[in-house]
Image (cartoon, helix red, strand yellow):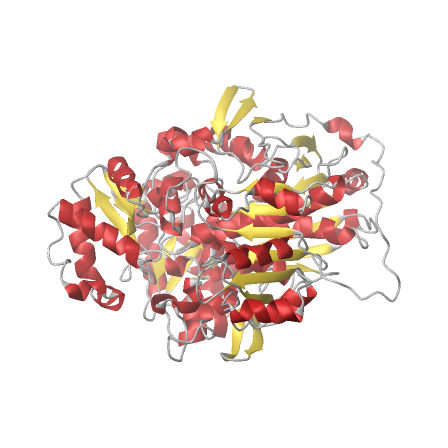
Amino acid sequence: MSEQAPRVVELSSPFARFAGRLLVGLGHEVVLVEPPEGDETRREQGGAAFVHWHAGKRSVSIDLAAPAGTVRLRRLLRGADILLDGTAHGAEAAAAGLDQLVHVRVTPFGLVGPRSDWQGTDLVVAALGGMLAQVGDPDGPPLRLPENQAEQLAGVNAAIAALLGLRARRRGPGQLIDVSAQACVAAALEAGALAYLHEDRVPPRPGRVHPLVPHGLFRASDGHLGGGLGGSPRMWDALLDWLREEKADADLAEPRWQDPVERKKHQDHVFKVVQDFVGTRPKAEFARQAQARKLPWAAVDLPHELPDNPQLAARDFFTRVTTLDGERTDLGFPFAFPEGRRRTELVAPGQGDDQNLLDDPPRPARTRTEPAADEPVRPALDGVRVLDLTWVLAGPYCTKILADHGAEVIKVESAGRPDPTRFAPFMHLSRGPHTDPNTNGYFNEVNRNKRSLALDTRTEEGVAVLRDLIAHCDVLVENFSSTVMTKLGLGHEALRAINPDIVYVSMSGMGHTGPRNDWVSYADTVSASSGLTGLTGWGPDDVVGVIYGHGDIVAGLQAALATIAALEHCAETGRGQHIDLSQLEAITAHMGTSVLRGTAARAAGNTHPRWSPQGVYRCLGADRWLAVSVRDDTEWTALCEVIGRPGLATDERTRTAEARRRESALVDGALGTWARGMSADAAVEQLQARGVPAGAVQDGRELVEHDPQLRARGFYVHQEHPVAGAFLHEGVPITLTRTPGGIREPAPVLGADTDAVLRDVAGLTPERIRHLRAGGVLR
């Protein structure tokens, strides 16, 4: 970074604190403003919560409720670049007139809309954002993802928002940015809403089996494994060969099973045969043997096992945190930054350790180019050109974010190396025939705002064209396995020789170094290795796992954050860099305090370690559920009045949260009985009217058709595709008030921009283009 790192002032909250942690990892100076009693995380989990969320930050203490508090905060903000504001009512008064400031407001439901003042917790936002509807058994209650994944999605989006604000500030003043945690969740559901948007259907909760690809959760002799049949004929053949060698193939050697449609149709039978094979073997040994055959399997590890993961250890992933009680090992950051350097040592500050910052003179403002009065407002990444070599979900999700905020993204693809989300029948979300590569709703969602170049990179001439393009791009993003780019002659050093300033972002499953860098990875296997799957369940012996592509979404978000950070670094230093992002490290960095808690971190359903009650309760109607969090005794009293049981508020058996946890059968029974006679929406309205965090568990249909908050925010955006027709897209979850992003164009038809890109970007002549087309290089 530059000599003077950006200063971030953090007014923390559960939805904002991860953003501050990520900015620490990027080398920013983050100043945590604590109330006189100290940040609440100092009293959670024996202090482990503070160690995780706030190590590496500086600490000042300000009583924002006192008359002088706003004055003191404003003095601190005069020298700041970013205000990370998680407060309910905002710090606009302290920030007013400070035009250098990028003010990022992070709230459960956003600053505008009829529910902007609703109370939200991780569970409630996960319910109203659609996440809960995607996890759990089809005939059972929805299940929360562990370690506050809704909060963490808001946090990484807020960090992206902060960097976009800094980028936009190079051409003008700072601005207010509105981050809705609900919208962040609704934008991270993989096919959760897309199945409804493109096929008029709402998939049931998948249990332990992926709804689209032939993968799931399997029981080993000593735990669980994530994996399945893979995504290519080669993987099926390799698995079948293994089963034959062990005489465990049952009837799977019959010719009928060579048809992937037949395998999908009778997946229960195929999975039973595989489960019989897997179930007698230890999880780690099976995973190693599968990976030796290039099959995508991974052991389901628990958080206390993560420090022993040889890949994470070899890449120096973990951080050592100095506290008043000694040194502790915690999770690291999602990627090494800048230029391959990873922050591995942090200090947890004492309260008010940096109080002197309140009396320091303001730091000099950074210089910026003032826009001309008649210059049109441009998105934050306008002028950035990205060469997109990604496919499926994680990589395209990263480049989608860049494109949404103004980058010119050139997607390189071809019929010869097809993206499965264009061509694979089992991933083809469409009302029409599943044979047209231009009508797939899955592809068209994550590739909007991009251009398509149809180029066969398996040929020497195709790679030569890539080199021409690289010379004229600012960023290259790919999510191949770790050796592909080197085999193409396009490793990092080769890229630097072509374009010294290039920002190169690789997104392999395990990273480009380490003893497992060649392991085959899917989203579910990465989630298995990260600890996320092992904590997703009703208890240690009842693991359900996370089956949809949450790990891919997280990797895409972190890669987008890395890309924008690297662009800022290049603007400051003139140097590009290689971001070697491991999807395993990206999702593991979202595992919260679990490593600090060690063996105490276990699957615990929808409960909360301190609050009670917290859970999901059945309501009137088919598969209708109510999510409720009660954070304190005041909310408990209000809930008791709403459900017509006021006596429970003063009953010694249920008067405190600790007592309510002991009497969970009584508490859940009373709340469950009331909810069962209510519609979910009516129950939520009554509870929210009394300040109790509550939300209906919404599926894709309810998000699109019925959610008034998302509608008021214009979250679902209508666009006309030239082949697929008109449909709604999932929108942009962060709103930059001065330089907004948006959905400008639908996804491209395959190869629609080939000639224009080759002519206008690579500088190829018409004769060269004709030669390439005649030789089959452009297809």
Give the image quarter of residue 135: bottom left
Q: Is residue 393 at all visible to an observer of this figure? A: yes
Residue found 52% across the figure and 19% down from its top: 325
| Percent x, y of residue 501 | 69, 45
Badge count: 0
On the rendered image, what quadrant is the N terminus found in?
Answer: top right
Outermost residue toward the right? 373
The answer to whether residue 174 is above or below residue 312 is: below
Residue 154 visible (yes or no): no
| Depth order, front residue of 209/710 | 209
In the depicted structure, whether residue 770 falls above or below residue 339: below
Vertical relation: 582 (above or below) 316: below
Residue at 32 percent of width and 70 percent of height: 622
Decide if residue 8 is on the left or right side of residue 304. Answer: right
Residue 367 relative to residue 568: left or right: right
Q: Residue 653 placed where, x, y %?
A: 35, 42
Q: Where is residue 265 in the image (x, y as percent from the top left)?
A: 23, 68
Residue found 61% across the figure and 61% down from its top: 409
Considering depth in this image, is 702 or 629 the residue closer to the camera? 702
Q: Is residue 255 toward the left or the right of residue 755 in the image?
A: left
Foreground: 333 or 763?
A: 763
Q: In which quarter of the image is residue 530?
A: top left
Where residue 141 sits: x, y (%)?
32, 58
